């Protein structure tokens, strides 16, 4: 694989743990909140009555909070979670998530720490606490918490990806590449920004060029030329113009034979 161009940076993903159902994809993690179904006395009940029966005002506070989180009503979700079981690491992690989405990082950090005080082995809170330190540019501390999260969960593409991002921020490029490769080997959709909510990390244009170029390489090497082209186009949108590199990079050998690649070069005046 070609050399990584400059320092890459990828969006940091959070882990939202729902008490009853956790999404199969560990990310924020694409949680689909189940709405509690109220028992009805008659199968002839009208649709309007059914909608009233399952509205958030009719369900327990934690389920109501889950619904509010899914709707993006984070302040209301916090208030609802605070009416729930405050001895639950899950509840405190979700409170932290809500604060995190509001960019109230100090409050989010305190909530994640409360979750870990209740359950030190709770990987979602470790991952999310690491994301706080990453956002505050305390990359070594973030690295510590990502590693701790990986000790207490099954293999998670998201956490490996986040750890790789922290390594890149520390200029530990080889380690960062290995973590991204590990994440991709677990879940080839880990780089898809549409699969789950996330809190964006900051970064320069050069860093965004780098991460998009690297992901393009990863997809190309895996044989997914369509996605390789998507991320290569993103790198170019951010300012990548190194034609010589594109022509010499062995990871793009197959992609270079496609008409879509030639069209991309034409569009970017790189032919």
Image: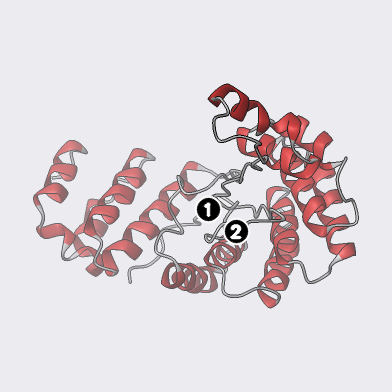
Which mark identifies residue 9?
A: 1
Quarter of the figure with residue 188: bottom left
Q: Secondary structure at mark 2?
A: helix
Image quadrant containing the C terminus: top left
Q: Which of the numbered marks, if any, corresponds to residue 150?
A: none
- Residue at coordinates 15% horizontally, 64% vertically from top-left? 254
Earlier residue among tags 2 and 1: 1
Is label 2 in contact with label 1 (beta carbons under 8 Å)? Answer: yes
User: Does residue 68 lie above or below 121 as drawn?
Assistant: above
Residue 134: percent from left, percent from top: 69, 54
Q: Which residue is mark 2?
A: 169
Q: CA distance from mark 2 to mark 1?
A: 7 Å
- Residue 198 coordinates in the image, percent (x, y): 58, 45
Would residue 262 appear left or right of 30 to someone viewing this image? left
Q: How is the model colour-coded? A: secondary structure
Packing grade of label 1 (10 A; few <14, some 14-19, many >=20) is many
| 169 left or right of 238 in image | right
Residue neighbourhood size for the residue with mark 2, other residues' Cα within 10 Å, grouped as few (<14), some (14–19), many (≥20): many
* Location of residue 32 with respect to 152 vertically, above or below: above
């Amino acid at each position: 694989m070609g050399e990584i161009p400059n320092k890459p940076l990828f969006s940091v993903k959070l882990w939202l743990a729902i008490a009853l159902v956790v999404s199969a994809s560990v990310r924020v993690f694409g949680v689909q909140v189940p709405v509690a179904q109220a028992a009805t006395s008659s199968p002839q009940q009208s649709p309007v009555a059914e909608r009233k029966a399952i509205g958030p005002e009719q369900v327990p506070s934690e389920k109501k909070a889950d619904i509010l989180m899914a709707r993006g009503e984070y302040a209301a979700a916090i208030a609802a979670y605070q009416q729930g079981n405050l001895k639950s690491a899950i509840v405190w992690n979700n409170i932290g998530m809500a604060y995190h989405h509001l960019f109230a990082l100090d409050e989010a950090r305190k909530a994640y720490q409360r979750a870990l005080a209740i359950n030190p082995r709770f990987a979602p809170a470790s991952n999310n606490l690491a994301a706080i330190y990453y956002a505050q540019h305390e990359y070594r501390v973030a690295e510590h918490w990502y590693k701790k999260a990986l000790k207490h969960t099954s293999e998670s593409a998201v956490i490996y990806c986040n750890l790789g991002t922290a390594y890149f921020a520390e200029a530990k490029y080889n380690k960062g590449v290995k973590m991204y490769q590990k994440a991709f080997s677990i879940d080839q959709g880990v780089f898809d920004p549409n699969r789950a909510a996330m809190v964006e990390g900051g970064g320069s244009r050069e860093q965004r060029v780098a991460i998009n170029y690297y992901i393009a390489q990863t997809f190309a090497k895996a044989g997914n030329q369509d996605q390789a082209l998507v991320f290569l186009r993103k790198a170019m949108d951010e300012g990548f113009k190194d034609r010589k590199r594109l022509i010499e990079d062995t990871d793009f050998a197959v992609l270079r034979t496609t008409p879509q690649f030639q069209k991309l070069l034409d569009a970017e005046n790189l032919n």
